[in-house]
Image (cartoon, rainbow, N blue to C red):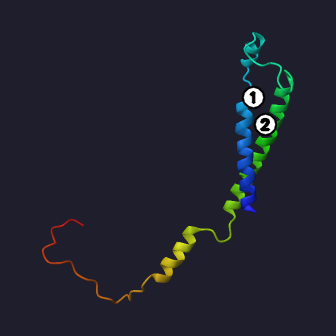
Amino acid sequence: MEKLVLVIHVIAALGVIGLVLLQHGKGADMGASFGSGASGSLFGVSGSANFMSKATAIFVMIFFSTSLTLAYMSSHRVSGSVVKANAASVINSAKVVPADAAVPKAPAGTEDIPK
């Protein structure tokens, strides 16, 4: 399930990037009026802006919802924690030292070393 949401997330991200790059800026209309731009595009003068902004809004909503879904899925994993797995292996491999075991003394001549 997580892989499917991730694929949809990447497709939505690429869609948002592509649509934003294809859209004209607010200053591009002035250039088109002087003949430097192609104002008669596939969707007409205002049709492309309307279609592109609606498609961008749809892709942004999909991207936002998949982002939240992926965040929820990663925070509610049952057995995906590296910390828990490492903690369990450390606890199982720890040696128990009896309380009455002799503590080794420092070697001779190290009394002047600060602790």
Q: Earlier in the sequence, mark 2 or mark 1?
A: 1
Residue at 21% across / 77% down in the picture?
A: 106
Residue 29, given in percent of the width and then of the height, sits at 76, 17
Mark 2 surroundings within 10 Å by alpha-carbon count, few (fewer than 14), some (14 through 19), many (20 or more): many
Say if 47 sits above or below 13 in the image. Answer: above
Is 114 positioned to the left or the right of 5 in the image? left
Residue at 75% across / 52% down in the picture?
A: 8
Residue at 82% across / 37% down in the picture?
A: 55
Asked which quadrant contains residue 77, the reply is bottom right
Say if 82 sits above or below 102 in the image. Answer: above
Q: Are marks 2 and 1 in contact (CB under 8 Å)?
A: yes
Q: Which residue is mark 1?
A: 23
Is 75 positioned to the left or the right of 104 in the image? right
Q: Secondary structure at mark 2?
A: helix
Residue toward you, 26 or 88: 26
Residue toward you, 110 or 2: 2
Q: Secondary structure at mark 1?
A: loop
The disc label shown at residue 79, or none: none
Mark 1 surroundings within 10 Å by alpha-carbon count, few (fewer than 14), some (14 through 19), many (20 or more): some
Residue 49, given in percent of the width and then of the height, sits at 82, 27
Asked which quadrant contains residue 25, the reply is top right
Q: Total marks drawn?
A: 2
Which of the two discs, 2 and 1, sits closer to the camera?
Answer: 1
Q: Quadrant of the N terminus?
A: bottom right
Q: Which residue is mark 2?
A: 56
Q: Quadrant of the C terminus?
A: bottom left
Is 92 positioned to the left or the right of 61 in the image? left
Which amino acid, by three-letter code, is at mark 1?
Gln
Say if 23 sits above or below 87 in the image. Answer: above
